[in-house]
């Protein structure tokens, strides 16, 4: 097995070789927001 190196983004902290990744987050809805700009912050 080849060695992989790099930086990743995840939901937790990992150190050392990672052989499994968490499921991807669902895509956001394709609909306009109904809340005001202040609530979006």
Image: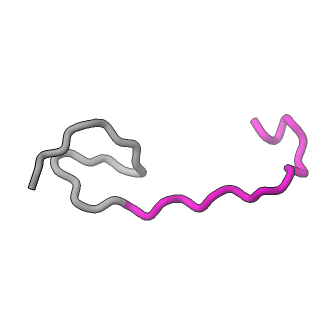
Q: Taken as a whole, is the magenta stretch helix, strand or loop? A: loop
Residue 23 location in percent, x, y?
Answer: 44, 64
Find the residue positioned furthest to the front. 2
Q: Residue at coordinates 59% horizontally, 62% vertically from top-left?
A: 26
How many tags in the picture? Answer: 0
Residue 18 location in percent, x, y?
Answer: 22, 54
Q: Would you say 7 lies left or right of 34 here?
A: left
Question: Is residue 15 covered in magenta?
Answer: no
Q: Is residue 27 above or below residue 5?
A: below
Residue 36 location in percent, x, y?
Answer: 90, 41
Q: Residue at coordinates 86% horizontally, 51% vertically from top-left?
A: 32
Find the residue positioned furthest to the left. 1
Check the picture and name the quadrant holding the C terminus: top right
Locate residue 8: give its quadrant: top left
Q: Would you say 37 lies left or right of 6 here?
A: right
Q: How is the image coloured?
A: one colour
Question: Is residue 37 covered in magenta?
Answer: yes
Residue 28 location in percent, x, y?
Answer: 68, 56
Q: Is residue 6 above or below residue 33?
A: above
Q: Residue at coordinates 78% horizontally, 40% vertically from top-left?
A: 40
Check the picture and name the quadrant holding the N terminus: bottom left
Locate residue 6: give its quadrant: top left
Q: Would you say 15 lies left or right of 10 here?
A: left
**The magenta segment:** 22-41
């Amino acid at each position: 097995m080849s060695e992989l190196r790099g930086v990743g983004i995840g939901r937790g902290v990992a150190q050392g070789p990672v052989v499994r990744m968490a499921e991807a987050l669902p895509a956001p809805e394709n609909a306009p927001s109904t809340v005001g700009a202040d609530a979006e912050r």
